[in-house]
């Protein structure tokens, strides 16, 4: 749970630190707005992705299940600046499948934290392996980071791609190739 009072105090200090007057009309309610915003965009810190992956259905399907183009928004833990993109999540069931919306919810839980894209990608893959007992998992995320596009090197449009491969996907190149074919 976000401590709203501490966030408000911190934002007031930040405004003063950059030479602003936190009491001027346009900024007077900004600390409270930002506290509420952080409560929302960092809500994954109190959530367990496993709760979304509990409800499964028996299935004889042993082929790849892919949910692609799952939009996510996150906050870089290094600069506390946004990054956003798409996640592509595939798994090979081992007698049970999960509702497709639950894959998106799993992505959302890990995205709504102060985060590193590479770490988030691994966390999604590990959660699926742990809670679904899959034969294999492959997760790819593609994101644009404002810490790269707005500041520093300033290269808008550049995307970072990270991948996590577990189980059968790690063992069999043909499964990885099928994953990439399915993304096209």
Image (tube, rainbow, N blue to C red):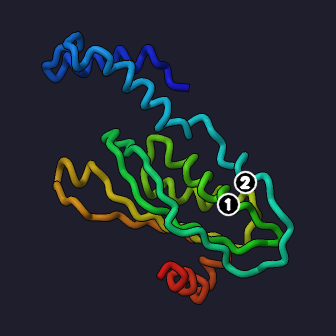
Q: Position of residue 39 (x, y in %)?
A: 49, 29
Q: Residues within 10 Å of mark 2 (few under 14, many from 20)?
A: many
Image mark for residue 53? 2
Question: Measured along the vertical axis of the image, is residue 156 above or below residue 58?
Answer: above
Instruction: Look at the numbered disc 2 and give the secondary structure of its residue.
Output: helix
The image position of residue 124, as x and y in percent, is 58, 57
- Residue at 43 percent of width and 65 percent of height: 162
Name the foreground residue: 70 vs 159: 70
The label on residue 161 is none
Residue of label 1: 128
Label 1 packing within 10 angstroms: few (<14), some (14-19), many (20+): many
Quarter of the image holding residue 154? bottom left
* Displayed quadrant of residue 165: bottom right
In this picture, is 38 found above or below 16?
below
Tell me the quarter of the image containing the N terminus: top right
* Residue at the bottom extreme of this rendering: 174
Residue 81 as seen in the image, left or right of residue 100: left
Disc 2 + disc 1, Cβ < 8 Å: yes
Work out whether residue 9 or residue 86 is closer to the camera in this orientation and state it. Answer: 86
Report how far apart the C-alphas of labels 2 and 1 lie in the structure. 8 Å
Instruction: State left or right for residue 143 relative to residue 41.
Output: left
Callout 1: helix, strand or loop? helix
> In the image, what residue occupies the spot 72% across and 58% down?
130
Which badge, 2 or 1, comes first in the chain's sequence?
Answer: 2
């Amino acid at each position: 749970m976000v401590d709203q009072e501490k966030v408000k105090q911190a934002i007031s200090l930040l405004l003063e630190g950059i030479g602003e007057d936190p009491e001027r009309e346009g900024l007077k309610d900004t600390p409270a707005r930002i506290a509420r915003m952080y409560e929302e965009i960092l809500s994954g810190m109190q959530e367990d992705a496993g709760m979304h992956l509990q409800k499964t259905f028996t299935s004889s399907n042993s082929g790849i299940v892919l949910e692609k183009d799952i939009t996510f928004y996150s906050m870089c833990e290094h600069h506390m600046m946004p990054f956003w993109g798409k996640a592509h999540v595939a798994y090979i069931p081992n007698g049970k499948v999960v509702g497709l919306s639950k894959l998106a919810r799993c992505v959302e839980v890990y995205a709504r934290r102060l985060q590193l894209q590479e770490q988030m990608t691994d966390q999604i893959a590990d959660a699926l392996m742990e809670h679904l007992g899959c034969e294999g998992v492959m997760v790819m995320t593609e994101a644009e980071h404002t810490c790269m596009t707005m500041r520093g090197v300033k290269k808008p449009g550049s995307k970072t791609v990270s991948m996590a491969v577990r189980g059968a996907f790690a063992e069999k190149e043909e499964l990885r190739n099928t994953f990439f074919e399915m993304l096209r």
